[in-house]
Image (cartoon, rainbow, N blue to C red):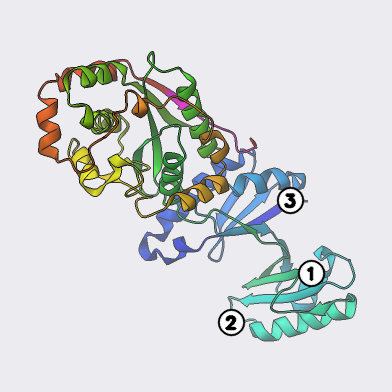
Amino acid sequence: MSLRIAVHYDEIGLKGGNRPFFERKLKDAVKAALELPGARIRTFAGRLLLEIDDEAAWDRAAQALGRVFGIAHFGRVWPAPADIDAIAQVALAILPEAEGLAFAVRARRADKAFPMTSPEINRVLGAKILAARRWRVDLENPAVTLLVSIVGTRALVSCERLPGRGGLPLGASGKVACLLSGGIDSPVAAYRMMRRGARPVFVHCHGFPYTTRAGQEKARRLAAILLRGQGAHSFWQAPLAEIQQRIVADCPKELRVLLYRRFMFRLAERIAAREGAQALVTGEALGQVASQTIANMGAVAAAVALPVLRPLVGCDKKEIIAEARAIGTYEVSIERHEDCCGYLLPPHPATRSTAAELEAAEAALPVAELVDAALAGAERENLTAPASEP
């Protein structure tokens, strides 16, 4: 017997004339995540309907679908003719047999040709379940909910609804270059952009050989967590050490971190051009550290022409930590490592710099040559992580 799964979306349904584009993107994402040969996906009555030949593939399919951006909820469904007795027969076959459960029936009649209204379907099916089970009705907090959708001559019957990630399907909003450190914030920022449909290109700037390679591997592990079940994506590692040495030697010490970041942005912008990304993404939150004041963020971003997106700018640290735990990056992020931005950190970094001040400091540096050399030493990996990884 085939396995059938109904995949529901919320926001995509509000896209009007652009809806087919988003549905195609969601189909592509689902197909890539499932990695199941012979899986068939089609649009059916405002949702996706999946048919998989192997009924035993449910656990694997559920794990994969739970990682797909753009899915509001999903669950196994069983088909039935659009007949109330046939629907009741299927419902009783899939409902649990335990005694004393509280239940509710939620029916949706998409086709008004069906002779009963949705409330009438609820009452009739509820009565049939009460006659067959020692259950009780609880519309507010049911332990079991029977879900019925009637479209034309068919009905889909289900008793489970698993949550999806919501948002928009990956790739529906273009591509962005995400600056990824080994800390807590930047993976959360990248995740938020992925949930809005932006395909990430990860860029990690490292201080090797003046720092160990542990930070590089940590950033790679964080990217792999974010990419579980999302297919292959670019992961770049760009050397910053020589640039930092020149900044330390030739520039005011209170501006070091800001100048480090301007070069990171330049490198990320050049990589974005190679990858076709349309914006940069950082994990900055307003006022969290000295470099993240309004003045400093503006002065650093002035080094590049691409838009700089900051999904966490209005968040506090507790919110960011809670989200990092929820998406599975927190435990890796808190492992100790040497951050290239912490290299030779001044005791009193500037908090109110201007673009003109930073440009004047950079006048002592061969900016273009330093960026070209760092980019020549950058390494690109086509990173992927199976949805089945924990």
The residue under label 2 is which amino acid type? Lys
Name which quarter of the figure residue 119 lies in. Answer: bottom right
Residue picked out by circle 2? 112
Q: Is mark 3 on a helix, strand or loop?
A: loop
Percent from the top left, x then y, of residue 102?
A: 80, 74
Position of residue 100 in the picture relative to residue 369 (left or right): right
Mark 2 vs mark 3, CA separation in Å: 29 Å
Q: Where's the C terminus, which quadrant?
A: top right
Residue at image mark 1: 91
Comparing 348 with 173, the one in front is: 348
Cα gap from disc 3 to disc 1, whole angstroms:
17 Å
Where 224 falls versus 82 (above or below)? above
Looking at the rendered structure, the secondary structure element under dot 2 is loop
> Neighbour class for label 2 at 10 Å: few (<14), some, many (≥20)?
few
Can you name the residue that lies furthest to the top here?
209
Is residue 386 part of the magenta span, yes or no?
A: yes
* 259 up-or-down from 11: above or below: above
User: What range of the chain is rendered magenta?
Assistant: 381-388
Alpha carbons under labels 2 and 1: distance apart: 22 Å
Q: Earlier in the sequence, mark 2 or mark 1?
A: 1
At mark 1, the secondary structure is helix
Please tell me the numbered disc located at residue 214.
Answer: none
Q: Residue 169 placed where, x, y %? A: 46, 50
Identify residue for label 3: 2
| Residue type, mark 3 in image | Ser
Q: Which of marks 3 and 1 is nearer the N terminus?
A: 3
Apparent side of residue 355 relative to residue 322 in the rendered image (left or right): left
Q: Amino acid under label 1?
A: Ala
Q: Which of marks 2 and 3 is nearer the N terminus?
A: 3
Q: In which quarter of the image is residue 57?
A: top right
Foreground of the two, 115 or 132: 132
